[in-house]
Amino acid sequence: MIKLSSKVLAGTLAITLAGTSLAWACEDGQKSYIEAGVSTFGGIPLVKGTKNFMNLQETAAVPLKELKGSSVTTADVFAHNGYAYLGTHRGKMTNEGVRIFDMKDPANPEEVAVIGNDIPGTWQEKVIVRSVSTPSFKGDIAAISVQRVDKERYGYEGETSPNGGVVLYDVTNPASPKKLGFWKTPSNLPTGTHEFWLTEQNNRLILLATNYQAKRYKDQGVEVHDFSIVDVTDPTQPKDLSNWDPTEVGGAFDGNYTYKDETGASRTAFLHSVIADETGKYAYLSYWDLGTIILNIEDPENPKFVGRTKFERDVQGAAHSAALAHGGNILIETREVFNPDPHDPAFERGWGYVRVYDIKDKSNPVLLSTFRTLNSAVQIKAGERQPGTYTVHDPKVRGNTLYLSHYSDGIRMVDLTDPSNPVEVGSYVSDKANVWGVFVDRNYILASDMGQGLKVLQKKGTGLR
């Protein structure tokens, strides 16, 4: 059931963006472009909201410093202990690393350090920071995904790293970071780690890594699968614990990337991202058309399949990212669909949107509702091209509010008090919006706009609650 409130209509009717700048999105998936918009607001962000978002405003817009004379494309954003961490996309393939900003004055973020920019021929999209206390390390750890540039695919002629993976830094003092270790994917895997998660189990720090389409290269001797579990309790000495192969899901999944679902639809299955719950007991793997797979990882050396989400015949899969709400009983699944004119005529002709599941019984996720912006709900006629990119991207949850990064639709704030009836309560669409990531910290919301850098939103007066 589609939920489109009057607030959604009001916040999106004014948006008609024509594509100008182009950049690759996730490295395969729909194999399409992300399009930013031309100026339609005269340089002024469009902000709408109710409740806690009535007086939200953009207080900072910080372009990234050019390190090597080329423009920088931003990726994920994270915040921890008063600092913001901004990843970078492939851009000009100049290895721009992760930028660290002091957020003491949120209206004037100050870039104080760069990490991860010393691995040639790679880029660093994903970043997570955690406070850690183990027998081997006490302090703040920043983990960064490392993906290798495919020379043949992108015509890259520079130096490349022999490995992808996840690099770990001590950022207890963010202005003076120190490299700790590097968990490396095999040298014969031309991709690397796309996204990952950090979780704690019984005084151990565990890395959950998605090795981008690793199984595709099995004939070339790549031994890891798309999902690896690694012990990084001692961040200077990462230790592999296990790799998980989704063939145990059963059905018509052939163990590579061709998959026929229960309805006979041909689909694609590869692991895009992963999260864990607060206990570190369950992992949620966004496995594209195979849905969100739930694993019990209490014994990280032997992960066990519990259940997964599934798609109706007319729904393109593309399970891209996940978040949890209501104490872990509600699963938010975002679907990154770039091509509203799909190859399968039975699929709906719209951008990707949100699906909300009840997972109290993790072996049987139950779809409660969907949430779409007006633009993502538009059904495109065959052969037509809608300007802009309106698929949903990443979800974050704070309390009962879901925050969505939505490319040309900016950031959407959604009330999940009743998960069966999600209602938009706020929206932010920057001029030429192309929002990749969103993160909520203290009294501000952070957005990473691919072409414009770090954006900061704050509420006038007392700030966000």
Image (tube, rainbow, N blue to C red):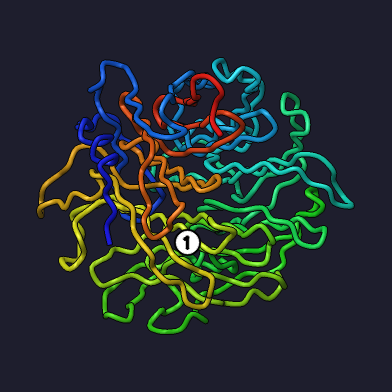
The image quadrant of residue 141 is: top right
Horizontally, residue 228 falls left or right of residue 147, namely right
Q: Residue at x 32, y 81 (%)?
A: 262
Q: Residue furthest bottom?
A: 251
Q: Which residue is mark 1?
A: 286
Indicate the secondary structure of the residue bearing disc 1.
strand
Find residue 195 and report its horizontal and vertical position in percent: 54, 51
The answer to whether residue 17 of the structure is visible from this angle is no
The quadrant the C terminus occupies is top right
Q: Residue furthest front?
A: 51
Find residue 24 and report its horizontal and vertical position in percent: 36, 42
- Tell me the kind of residue under disc 1: Ser
The answer to whether residue 363 of the structure is visible from this angle is yes
Horizontally, residue 415 falls left or right of residue 43, namely right
Q: Residue at x 66, y 35 (%)?
A: 80
Q: Residue at x 41, y 32 (%)?
A: 450
Mark 1, Cα crowd under 10 Å, few <14 / some 14-19 / many 20+, is: many
Image: 98 above or below 27: above
Find residue 361 and report its horizontal and vertical position in percent: 53, 75
The quadrant the N terminus occupies is bottom left
The image quadrant of residue 167 is: top right
The image quadrant of residue 344 is: bottom left
Horizontally, residue 208 falls left or right of residue 425, namely right
